[in-house]
Image (cartoon, rainbow, N blue to C red):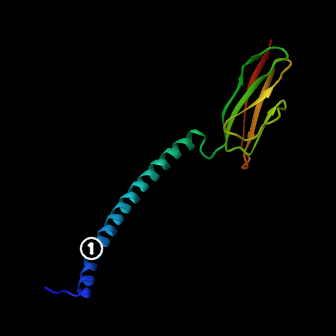
Amino acid sequence: MVTNARTVVHWLWVPVLLAVAYAGWVIYSRSSENRELEKAAEQKQGEADAKVLEKLGGSSLKILMFYANPPVVRKGGHGLLCYGVSNAKRVQIEPGVEGTGPSISRCVEVRPSKDTEYTLKASDDKGGEASQSVTVRVQ
């Protein structure tokens, strides 16, 4: 049986085309599965994000925490005032403490010379205000 090169080359394209079609089908089916998995993961992440946002006060101004550590300091010593606020544009602690600003979690150093009540005041850009107080005792 005599075959010419042209016929052989012509028939070699058939398995190549079948292999390309199969590879295309595999890639398409896997990418479709991946899109479904990504969509489910995005939905799950969105639900988790909503839960975190709700815990952090949603879209409203909220003082998450404000405490002294330790609540009693030695005379001449120092302590920390730790606070967290959500959705605040301005934050201050009175009497004046340096280093304050909007933050979900921040601690600033204080050196009271006598028992001192500190008041955290937070405000948002909508006119909302919130405040909370804590006392640091000096021994």
Crowd class of label 1 (few under 14; some 14 to 19; many from 20; radius 10 Å) = few
| Residue occupying the far left of the picture | 1
Horizontal and vertical percent position of residue 137: 78, 16
Query: What percent of the width, then of the height, locates residue 107?
Result: 73, 31
Quadrant where the N terminus is found in the figure = bottom left
In the image, is residue 59 above or below residue 36? above
124 and 74: which is toward the camera: 74
Name the side, left or right, on which 37 lies relative to 126: left
Asked which quadrant contains residue 123, the reply is top right
Residue at position x 70%, y 32% from top? 83
Residue type, numbered disc 1: Leu
Instruction: Point out the image quarter for the C terminus.
Output: top right
- Residue at x 22%, y 88% (from the top left corner): 4
Q: Image quarter for residue 104?
A: top right
Secondary element type, mark 1: helix
| Residue projecting furthest to the top | 139
Asked if residue 5 is positioned above or below residue 114 in the image, the reply reads: below
Q: Nearer the viewer, residue 47 or 1?
A: 1
Badge count: 1
Q: Is residue 77 left or right of residue 48?
A: right
Q: Which residue is mark 1?
A: 18
**Where residue 77 sits in the image (x, y, percent)?**
82, 18
Q: In this picture, is 66 found above or below 58?
A: above
Q: Where in the figure is residue 61, as x and y percent of width and height?
A: 67, 42
